[in-house]
Amino acid sequence: MNQEKIGKFIATLRKEQNLTQEQLAEKLGITYKAVSKWECGKGLPDASIMMELCKILKITVNDLLSGERVDKEDYQKKLEKNIIDTIDYTDKKVSEKNKLIYEMIMFFGLGLIFIAFTIYPNDSSWGSIHSIIGLLISTFGFVNIKSGKTILKKVFFGIGYFMIGFILLLLLDYSNVVLNKVAPRFSYLKETGDTMIIYKTPFYNVYRINRNTKNEYYIIDTKKEYTENIPITPFNRDKSGIDNIIQYKNKYVGNNSNDSHLIDNLPLAEYGYVFKIDSENLGLTIDYHITDWYVNESHYLEKSLLYNSVSIFALIDNVEQITFNFSGNTYTVSRKQIKELYPNFKDIVNNGINQNNFNKYLENKMNDDNFVENTFKKIFVN
């Protein structure tokens, strides 16, 4: 069926009847844009108005579908051809309409996945549930876009589409976990403790430590090696851990930028501070914007001062004395006191910084309240 030929035929007959597109459209109860679309060969009149159109143009339906006036001797032949072409045209339009519907279903499913990833919190099970529902809807749309597929092909393509989509969701979720330090959406088990949540996924585990505190941090265990000895510290390990603060190791106190970065990543910095350097006596004074007793729940102040002191003396080679000022009290410590009274300090600074020993003799010890309390009393002069 030649739509362009039919369109030109309609335009010629309309002009013969001295009708504008608007006038013809008004007689048919449609918009003039529809008439323009026919005459441009971009569509055909609906069957519901075809008889009325032919009556106005003074032709038969057979003439209209042929795009010309049909001679009597060719009438039957043209009629049969037009019937077949009309069936094919109708089937094509139905197929195109169905394709559009299934494309909309597929993209609706993808949109549902996007919404699930952007609206729901990472640790909400609704996010993963709606993502899977969205993927199922998208899969249904995808397998039905192209007509003529057998049931077996639909099943095959459906399984493939779903599996690829699910793998992409897992990869997207993992990337989000690694880059943004958040809980995974697709965890099959969630174990909640007093201060820690463990999220177990098919390929890795995530430990959310110090949850809902200023010092919350995540450990992503891709090897699933932390079955017992999970690296737990009362501080934000991503900031205060040796893997991060070792970059601020310096031979001399007085490098303000380096000193500032180091202090800013150590515990208590979250409350605000200012610092000053005594170059003559190689001293460092840090004034924290907080009262000392206010932050000492679960020995947090004592743990922080011990951790900060050992870290600063280990990472800045020539600093000899540190003074920590609070609105309540002042705490002073010297390198000599740390060397003599903090157990295994020499092992921590052996040949530079031994990171394993740092974690073993400093970070891990901050979980031992008895050790912290006894060591703090030995070292600090209040």
Image: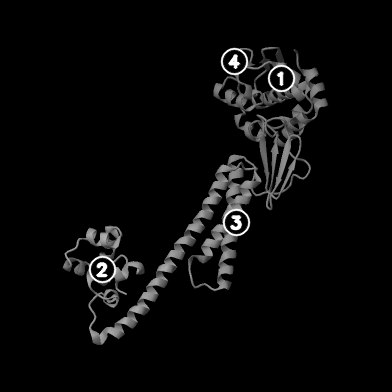
Give the distance between the C-alpha atoms of the residues marked 3 and 2, in whole angstroms.
48 Å
Query: What residue sits right under mark 1 in the picture?
Result: 335
Give the distance between the C-alpha atoms of the residues marked 4 and 2, in whole angstroms.
87 Å
Which is more foreground, mark 2 or mark 1? 2
Query: What residue sits right under mark 4 in the picture?
Result: 276
Residue 74 visible in rendering:
yes
Query: What residue sits right under mark 2 in the picture?
Result: 7
The earlier-in-sequence mark between 1 and 4 is 4
Which is more foreground, mark 4 or mark 2? 2
The earlier-in-sequence mark between 4 and 3 is 3
Disc 4 marks which amino acid? Lys
Quarter that holds the C terminus: top right
Which is more foreground, mark 3 or mark 1? 3
Instruction: Relative to 264, say whether 56 is above or below.
Output: below
From the viewer's perspective, is 53 left or right of 309? left
Instruction: Relative to 9, say whether 260 is above or below.
Output: above
